[in-house]
Amino acid sequence: MCGSISSSGKRYEKNDTLEMALKVKQELEKQGVRVVMTRDEDEFVTLQDRCKKANWVMADLFVSIHRNSAESGDGVEVWISNEENEKSSKLASSILEKIDQVGIQTNRGVKTGTSENSEGDYFVNKNTKMPSCLIELGFISNKKDNELWDKNADQYAKAIAEGIVQNLER
């Protein structure tokens, strides 16, 4: 499974998000944060296994990085459980604020539930036992979002890491 694909067919969500996750990991480790990845190479890991791993290691936070896709749309949004845990809300807000400071087309906000159902939840937000969020880091189907991604990938990684560090209890 590769997730979303750009309209050119040359850009895959799975590649962008793995690259970003590895950059975020590197930034966090520079600050002395222990990071456990649910995948660190191009392999398929089920959502169930991702949640199991996070719960098993008793992670402090769970952050899932994605790319959005639609015929029209742009910008960044961060999703949390519709049961709006205060810590998840603070985590999502911190990350989105930092990303927005780097530069994005549209700040689509922190949202609860799923894009199809505000009463539902994305699997990872529902099935992890720690504060969690799912970042939709721009639309892979939007040329300008991809240009911003390519230009700002390192800064986005730093921004995500800063937002995470702000929410760690040290």
Image (cartoon, rainbow, N blue to C red):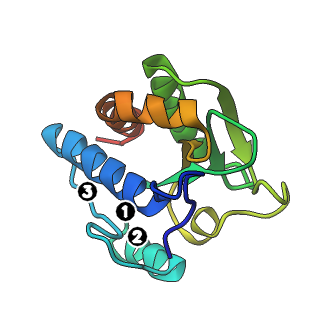
Q: Secondary structure at mark 3?
A: loop
Q: Secondary structure at mark 1?
A: loop
Q: Quadrant of residue 73?
A: top right
Density class for disc 3 (Cα within 10 Å; few <14, some 14-19, many ≥20) is some
- Gap in angstroms between the C-alphas marked 2 and 1: 5 Å
Quickly name the residue at label 2.
54
Q: Residue 108 location, x and y as percent?
A: 69, 32
Q: Nearer the viewer, residue 69 or 45?
A: 69
Q: Secondary structure at mark 2?
A: helix
Horizontal placement of 164 versus 122: left or right? Answer: left
Residue 68, above or below 14: above
Quickly name the residue at label 1.
59
Residue type at the position of mark 1: Ala
Q: Looking at the image, which residue is at 54% across and 47% down?
A: 135
Residue 114 visible to an observer of this rendering = yes
Horizontal placement of 146 versus 86: left or right? Answer: left
Residue 60 visible to an observer of this rendering = no
Asked whether disc 2 touches disc 1, contact meaning CB atoms under 8 Å apart, the reply is yes
Mark closest to the chain's N terminus, 2 or 1: 2
- Gap in angstroms between the C-alphas marked 3 and 1: 9 Å
Of marks 3 and 1, the one in the foreground: 3
Residue type at the position of mark 2: Ala
- Gap in angstroms between the C-alphas marked 2 and 3: 11 Å
Quickly name the residue at label 3.
35
Q: Nearer the viewer, residue 54 or 49?
A: 49
Q: Residue 69 location, x and y as percent?
A: 65, 51
Q: Nearer the viewer, residue 123 or 21?
A: 21
Q: Quadrant of residue 127?
A: bottom right
Q: Residue 22 location, x and y as percent?
A: 26, 53
Q: Looking at the image, which residue is at 39% across and 40% down?
A: 164
